[in-house]
Structure formats: C-alpha cells, structure tokens
Image (cartoon, grey):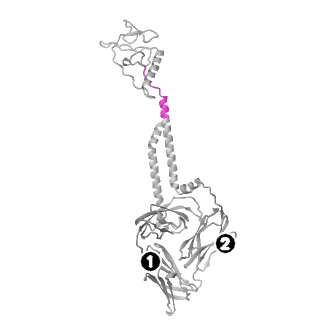
Amino acid sequence: MITFLSLFLRMYRRIVVMSVSVFIVLCTVSFVSAFGISPTPVFESNAVNDVRIARTINIVRSNNDDAVLIKIYKSGDSARYIDLPVDEFIAPAGQILTPYTFYIAPSAAANGRHTALLLFEKQGAVDELGAIINGARGLEAIGLSVGFEISDRQVLGLKVADSVFEPLELGMPLSISYLLQNTGNVDTKLDKIQIDVVDITDENHTYSRTVLKQDLEFISPGASERRFFMLDEKMPMGRYKATISYFFNQERIFSDHRTIEVLAPGTLGQSMDIISLNVPEGPVHVGTVADIISVIKNTGKVGFASRMYVDIYKDGERLDTLRAKDVFLLKDQQTEFRSDFMFNQGAGVYRLEIYFTYGAQKTAVSEFSIQVINSHSSFSLLTWFKSNIIITNMPLCIFLIILLMLMTICCFLKNRKQKKEKEYQQQMPPVAYAVPQGVPQQQQEYVAPVVPQQMPVQAQQGSQTMYPPVFVPQQQQQQQQQQGVTSMQSMMPPEVPIMTPPQMPQVQPTPPQQYKSGNPASFVSEEKDDWTDNGTY
C-alpha cells in the first residue's frame, strides 16, 4: 500500500500536466467547430478616428442545423475600438449564412495598425420564440481577427453591383434593388440613379425616372447594403427594355441592361414566413430595456419590401409604436429585425402587438403579455458570480474544479503516507547497546546483549588464550541496558536510534575473574582455571 501511494504521489504532477494538456486540446478542438465565419480575417486600411466603419460577416452553418443563440465576446488591446450593436443573436434553423454587422469605431487611436479579436460562441439551441432549450454553453466557438490601420486622410469611394429587376404583374410597380458598398472611410452617398424603360413593341412608349441625391441615403464607411427603389408608373402588360445607371462623384460608376415582362394578374404571388420571434419573458424590472428580435423569409416568387411594427400597450393605452427600417427581400431571402423598448412606465402588465408588412400585404398580429415589477436594490453576489463567471466560463470552471479535486486527493494521500511512516518509526524498538557503569569513557568495552547461560569459547590458539566473556545477571543486565540507552540517547539527537555499537578499545587480556553475587563490579581473582577445552565449566 505504501509503495502504491509513493508511486501515485510521484506521478501526481504528471497527472496535473496531462490534465492541463487535455484542457488545451479541448479548447483547441472547440474552435474547430461545425460552424465558421466568412470572410476572415477582417481588415480596414483607411480607418479614421471618430468615424464608424461598418463591416458585415456571415456565420456559416449546415443547412440541417437547429436555431441557436450565438453570443459575441471581444478581446485585445484594440477591442475598445470595436462597437457591437448586439452581443448576441439567433442563427435561424436551416440558414447556411447568417449575417452579422459590427463597427470599427476608433477614437483617439494612434496612427498605425490595430488588432482585436471577436469570439462567436454557441449558447444553446432555441425554440420558435427564441427561448433557450438546453444550456449547452461554450461547446463550439470560433474567433475572428479584426484589424484596421489609422490614416490621416479621408477617402471617398462607392461600389455598386448586382442590380435585380423583380418580376411584375399587371398593376404592380417596377421594383429594382442594387448592392451598394462604401469602400472609403467617410459617410457618403450616390449622386443620382437614372432608369429608362422602353416598350419593345413600341419604342415611343417609354418610362423614366431619376432619383436625385437628396432623395438617397448615406451609407457608412465599410458598409455593404442592398438598396431598392420603385418606378412610379405602373406599366401595361408587355415586354420592356430597361437601362439603369448609377452616378458618383460626377461619374457613372455602374450601369445595367435588362429585359423585363409584365405578366397577367395572379401569375405571381407574394408570401412571407416568420422564422422566429423573440420577446423577453416576464417578470422584468422597471427600467429594463427589452430586445424584440424577429427573422422573416420571403417564400414567394417575387421580391418585396418588408417592415416590422410593434405596438406597446399598458392598461388599455397605447404607449408607443416601434417601426423597423424597411428591408427589401429577394426570392428565398431572409432578414432579421430588431427593436428596443424600455419599460419605464411603472409596474404592471405590458401588452405587445407585433405584425409585419410585405409588399401590399400584412401579416396577422402576434400578442405577448409581459409582467413588469418594481426593481429592488438588493444585490446577490452569488447571482452575479453565477451569471458573469460560471456561465460565461463554464469549460474553465469545470477544469479548475477537476484540478482542485485532484490536488486535494494528492495532498490527502501525501499526508496519509507521512502519518503512516511516522507511526511505523514509532513502533520500531530503539537499537542500543549497554555500557558497564564505573568505567571511564575512553576505556568502555562493548558488552554483548543477553545470551544463553552457557557460552562456548575457543580453546587456546597458539600461545594466546581466549577468555570467556563476563556474565552479568539478567536483572542487572537489564538495568545496565536501560541506563546505557538513557545515556546514549542523551548524547544523540531526538528520535535517532543508536544503530552502531561503540568502538571497542584495545585492552590487554587479563586473567579470568569471578565476581561476587550481588555486585558485578566486585571481582575476585583466582589462579585456578575451571574452563575446559570445549568451552564449558
């Protein structure tokens, strides 16, 4: 048992090292996950202080994945220059690409290159309302390196691509969408957009529209957005040639030519599905800011503009109406809407009515009731520790708990081993040798331990005679041994047994003597030798 404990205690450091290695491997494997980021890395070469540059990335997943909640963390010396509009979002089920937009927003940053890290971590699968089904946290995560270089010069740049002309039915206006990207480092917008439509069967039958600069919106540096506009006139059935041109900085930067057809009524259809709708669950405290998040998808055959509306009621009175920004959705495209609202009208029951518009249609109203209570000032340190330390660092906490348990077991086994060794030493009898009394230290002779009553001796060898040892009665011998042990222990360090007998001085042999009973130090010399050759009397 002691050997096993010794072996285990010698190996416990290796066990700790192996545990740390396994933890590092698990963390590395967690980054090689089932989902990824595109594009990566992100770098902005023309960043300017006090200018926000939008960057959009896509979370890439399999088309058979469930809807999950993804939380974003940022780290690094330049992380303070990264602005996250939201620190968590829902990746819808079956969606391969889920867009996420953040901002590079340096302020008083030194000239040169800066780098930060964004960590996208799965928090668990969610249901149709956005509530987390399971608590699997930190099992999959991936990092995104974000770099930018601070420049002193302002750069203007716009890029237009991918014009889309939506199919038409009789009575529908022509809808055109385009992808606009700001490649500079300052807010800017197009000068104008010009569209000309000519009837193929009758070139005298034309339609045109010019969208001027004052009617267009700015786009942030680094942002990439799909914009749309519509032709005012509604064209009759037929085939048309359309030409669209985009102008910036007094130059035409992009143009496109398409053939469009106006179909009979009922040929096409507009439809929309609500993929997810996430509202806060009650009760919540007064002053809480609620995030209302929804994901919708265009399941029809034509594109349309869509918007989310949220009507907020309390005690039968409408407090506010939230309107999200219009988003144009192409066929099979989906998007996410977000609206924020603060419950600052006191405690009670708040009712939310949420609906969407798409094209000329409107969805049914979804109602939610949220209980709002007065906040209390008590602060639970355990709750804060659980939510900010344990939940967000679950793998690290599990590893530290396992490591602490291993170290506790090792310390317990080590102390147990030392205790057993100490008990074993205390149970061992001390080894000592008796020394006769009254003999000077330099002349002390070694006295053998107790031996049988008759001890054989050797006969004469040559001219030298071997004399028998001196016999001491058993009781007196025990007293001498005790006194000798006491005297020897007083000269040695504590708990150190006397393992080596004292050196026997070279003493000339003397004739055999007999001692009187009762006093081993009193000897009577006799000339008579009663010893025989075989060592007996």
Element assignment for label 1 = strand
Please state the horizontal and vertical placement of residue 209, each as a whole percent of the image. 51, 86
Please state the horizontal and vertical placement of residue 325, each as a whole percent of the image. 56, 75
Amino acid tagged 2: Arg
Q: Answer few, some or many: residues within 10 Å of disc 1's Cα (few below 14, many 20 plus, some between 14 and 19).
A: some
- According to the picture, the residue beneath numbered tag 1 turns out to be 159
Disc number placed over residue 318 in the picture, else none: 2
Q: Farthest residue toward the right?
A: 316
Taking depth in this image into account, of 214 and 179 the one nearest to the observer is 214
Distance Cα–Cα, label 2 vs label 1:
43 Å
Please state the horizontal and vertical placement of residue 322, each as a whole percent of the image. 60, 72
Element assignment for label 2 = strand
Q: Which mark's residue is nearer the viewer, 2 or 1?
A: 2
Up/down of 23 relative to 175, above or below: above
Taking depth in this image into account, of 467 and 421 the one nearest to the observer is 421
Q: Is any atom of residue 175 visible in this view?
A: no
Amino acid tagged 1: Lys
Which segment is the magenta one? Answer: 420-434
Residue at the (42%, 12%) spot, across then down: 521
Mark 2 vs 1, N-terminal side: 1
